Image: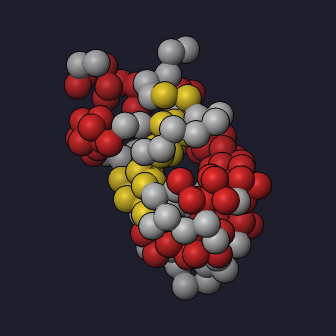
């Protein structure tokens, strides 16, 4: 995909979602996202299967406010209020999620439900939010979307 097409896709909030993105494609996506004015965040789950550790790592990587309670409700609150980091969109590159997906699938699903709710809320404001995992998991479409 050309850089121009990638840029237009990343700016298209109705296309935004949660996807598998191979590591070899991350640099091109990051460059296009940054060119579009999106804030990009790298989040490593570091092979943790514990959701409390994962939530802590998300908060740290995204520099959430001190009041972040490291639970799903607080995660949604912070993901839908980036007043501390205003941008034309938001992109999360997540690595090391294999253990959480394999060992705690219910928590992995709930985490993605929270991401999906935040993406939907940003879509109402015509701002894209993208979540990219480097793992191939059930239910994750491969980027780019073919809609």
Q: Residue furthest bottom?
A: 66
Residue sitting nearer the eye, 104 or 130: 104
Quarter of the image with the C terminus in it: top right
Image location (x, y in percent) of residue 28? 24, 36
Vertical arrangement, residue 2 with respect to residue 106, above or below:
above
Image location (x, y in percent) of residue 100? 61, 59
Vertical arrangement, residue 44 with respect to residue 144, above or below:
below
Residue sitting nearer the eye, 91 or 44: 44
Instruction: Name the residue: 61% across, 83% down.
Output: 67
Left or right, 129 with reference to 61: right
Count numbered badges in the picture.
0
Q: Is residue 96 visible?
A: yes
Residue sitting nearer the eye, 125 or 9: 9
Image location (x, y in percent) of residue 114? 69, 53
Left or right, 46 with reference to 81: left
Image location (x, y in percent) of residue 3? 23, 25
Vertical arrangement, residue 50 with respect to residue 23, above or below:
below
Q: Is residue 35 visible?
A: no
Quarter of the image with the N terminus in it: top left
Q: Residue furthest top?
A: 147
Instruction: Name the residue: 32% across, 25% down.
Output: 6
Left or right, 55 with reference to 104: left
Instruction: Name the residue: 63% across, 53% down.
Output: 102
Instruction: Name the residue: 58% across, 35% down.
Output: 140
Left or right, 69 with reference to 18: right
């Amino acid at each position: 995909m050309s850089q121009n097409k990638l840029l237009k896709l990343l700016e298209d909030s109705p296309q935004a979602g949660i996807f598998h993105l191979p590591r070899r494609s991350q640099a091109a996506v990051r460059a296009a996202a940054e060119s579009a004015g999106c804030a990009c965040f790298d989040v490593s789950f570091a092979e943790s299967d514990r959701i409390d550790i994962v939530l802590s790592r998300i908060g740290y990587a995204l520099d959430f406010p001190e009041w972040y309670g490291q639970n799903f409700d607080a995660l949604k609150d912070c993901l839908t209020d980036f007043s501390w980091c205003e941008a034309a969109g938001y992109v999360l590159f997540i690595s090391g999620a294999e253990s959480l997906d394999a060992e705690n699938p219910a928590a992995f699903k709930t985490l993605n439900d929270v991401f999906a709710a935040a993406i939907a809320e940003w879509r109402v404001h015509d701002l894209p939010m993208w979540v990219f995992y480097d793992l191939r998991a059930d239910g994750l479409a491969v980027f780019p979307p073919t809609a």
